[in-house]
Amino acid sequence: MIDAAVKALSQILSPPMRSILWRSIALALVLVAVLAIGLQRLLSWLATYGEGWAEAMLGPGAHTPLNVVAWILSIAAGLGIVLGGILLMPAITSLVASVFVDEVADHVEREYYPAERPGIALPLTLSVTEGIKTALLTILVYLIALPFVFLAGAGFLVFFIATAWLLGKQYFELAAMRFRPPAEAKLMRRDNAGIIFTAGLIIAAFVSIPIVNLATPLFGMAFMVHMHKQLSRPGPELIGQRRRSSAPSA
């Protein structure tokens, strides 16, 4: 697993991957900007509407205090948008990864597994659908865990564990579906749930590093291509059975 992570890290900065890296970063930044603008407009509208409603209820004398409250809330909302963008980065990278899954996997397979059968490119609708589902599930889990942030940081631990499970699941299944039907890929992930979750912890640590996490789609996908290759190889017991079955009988 460590070897797979090192290979993935070394490859994301290689010349063949740089084009994908810059395009994935650009797409991630666009998604972050769209999300931030949308949240800012929503919060601004809510603040304006709330201030007007409160002034109508309390009378003109409350205009100045309400302006002060609205100003404080606008600052808090701005900080919330920044924090929200950081916390939602796993969801954003899930969407980005679904777009570049095959390009990344092709480079990894050509460099490290040239003698093996290459994977089949996933339909864009399938990969993007998987990315959207993971992103929405990530947001849902984060909203559920958000109240626990104020309980001695328990929420951040929930965030980290949830991110490890969600991203490990998505990246592995995308890598596996290049070689297997979706149902078989999901079954393989469940059969190796412990290993894939542990690998997901590495991806979760990567995505928690500001700026560096913009490269998560490349690292996560390359990492799980290696993990799928390792888990697809027969174990020693199965190899021994094959050798015994192929040996000539006395």
Image (spheres, helix red, strand yellow):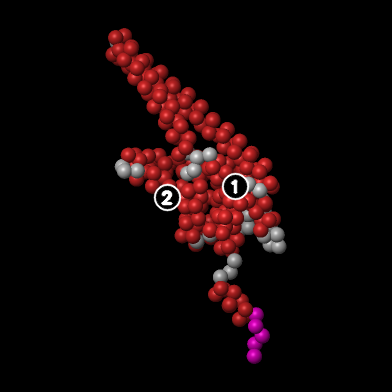
Residue 46, above or below 24:
above
Residue carrying label 1: 218
Residue segment shown in magenta? 246-250
The residue sitting at the top extreme is: 60
Residue 19 seen in the current view: yes
Look at the image and tell me in which quarter the C terminus lies.
bottom right
The dot on residue 161 is 2
> Residue at the spot x=61%, y=76% of the render?
242
> In the picture, residue 230 is in which quadrant?
bottom right
Image coordinates for residue 177, horizontal then vertical, percent: 60, 54
In the image, is 3 to the left or to the right of 148?
right
Question: Which is nearer the eye, 19 or 241?
Answer: 19
Question: Which is nearer the eye, 221 or 177?
Answer: 221
Q: Earlier in the sequence, mark 1 or mark 2?
A: 2
User: What secondary structure is the stretch in magenta mostly built from?
Assistant: loop
> Disc 1 versus disc 2: distance between alpha carbons?
21 Å
**Of helix, strand and loop, which one carries label 2?**
helix
